[in-house]
Amino acid sequence: MKILFDYSIFAYQTLGGISRYYINLDKEIKKQYSCNILAPAHYNKFLKEYSSYKGTYFKKFPRFTNKLFNLYNKISTEQFIKFNEPEIYHKTYYTNFWPKNFKGKKFLTVYDLIHEKFYKDYNFSSDYRPKKKALENSDAILAISYKTKKDLVEIYGISEKKIFVTHLGVNLEFSKSKTNIIKDPYILYVGDRKRYKNFQNLLKAFAISKKINTNFKLVVFGGGKFLDDEKKLINENDLKKNKIIKIDGDDIVLNTLYKSANLFVFPSKYEGFGLPLLEAASNNCPIACSRIEVFNEIMGQHAKYFDPYSVEEMIISLEEVLFSETVSKNLASKAKLTSSNFSWSKCANETLKIYKDI
């Protein structure tokens, strides 16, 4: 069986969980079958560091050349198919391009339906359906959670029989760390902070609870510089710079932060999966997160939940974990157990089974 992952996500995303997903999937599938990530021209930093792919990295596409690079990617893909004849074509994002000369089975993975569910936040209309054509042209659809599958059925009206769930994994390599980066006790937040990520409510909870902010720092990893509205909220609540620490870095830095954190907080209003939960769990880090369907699907009873729309309930949950050694240790040990149920090897084997069964 010959498998091809296309260029779509790698020519669209410089960093992010989706590109990590395909790189890890490619690594695992290569152990059993011929598998290629084809990204003739891309600017994905994760792929740049991955030695086993076909293509060229650009720091960024020169101004006004996006269409030219897109055309180059399409032509190169059709040429690769002509000479290598893959049997499986797995589209990595929701573009409308499907190579005309491909005669095998077509697959698409759906991660979430954030734009459809939070269309107002993105100034889209209520009938915005960006994935429609890609979904219709796929022979089978992979969803990274049962929640995503449920949303696909409800929003796009796709038959349940066409959708298969393959949970993500957590890297066993995600274990290297440095000595402690932060000396003081701290709460950890990871990743993007915009819109549905609900970071502002976490900021409010941290500001209101003097019990928390006098004993713990809030460490924010990744997600870019603080935006003006975030800075305003920080200043309005008199949160001095040394109370909130912004850190960027690689996986080793992130892993170190997970290992030493007193609590990992994930306050999102919606997610398609929630990979940081598994990253924290694999590092024995206690977790407090939103009471949303997909988080319960992943963590079960092994996290402390709160209503993401209630700052007051968030404070209660955070304080309960932070100031009870018994609760904290219990959550940490159970979280570690949960993470062991998710691996990239398992994800790859489930994906291969779907390829074969369709």
Image (tube, rainbow, N blue to C red):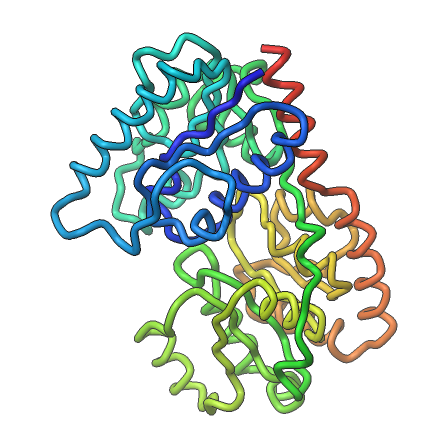
Q: Quadrant of residue 226?
A: bottom left
List the single residue furthest toward the left: 64
Q: Position of residue 200 (x, y in %)?
A: 45, 69
For the C terminus, the quadrant is top right
The quadrant where residue 187 appears = bottom right
Report the residue at 66% width, 34% height from top. Answer: 347
Along the viewing direction, whichever of 46 and 288 lies nearer the viewer: 46
Residue nearer the viewer, 187 or 282: 282
Left or right: residue 81 compared with residue 284: left
211 with respect to 159 (left or right): right
Most foreground residue, 152 or 168: 168
**Residue at the location (62% across, 68% down)?**
314
Q: How many marks?
A: 0
- Please identify the quarter of the rendering in which residue 116 is found: top left
Q: Quadrant of the N terminus?
A: top right
Q: Camera-side residue: 100 or 350?
A: 100
Image position, residue 302 (x, y; %): 78, 54
Residue at 37 percent across and 72 percent down: it is 225
Q: Position of residue 119 (x, y in %)?
A: 33, 43
In the rendering, at what x and y percent does residue 29 appear?
Answer: 62, 30
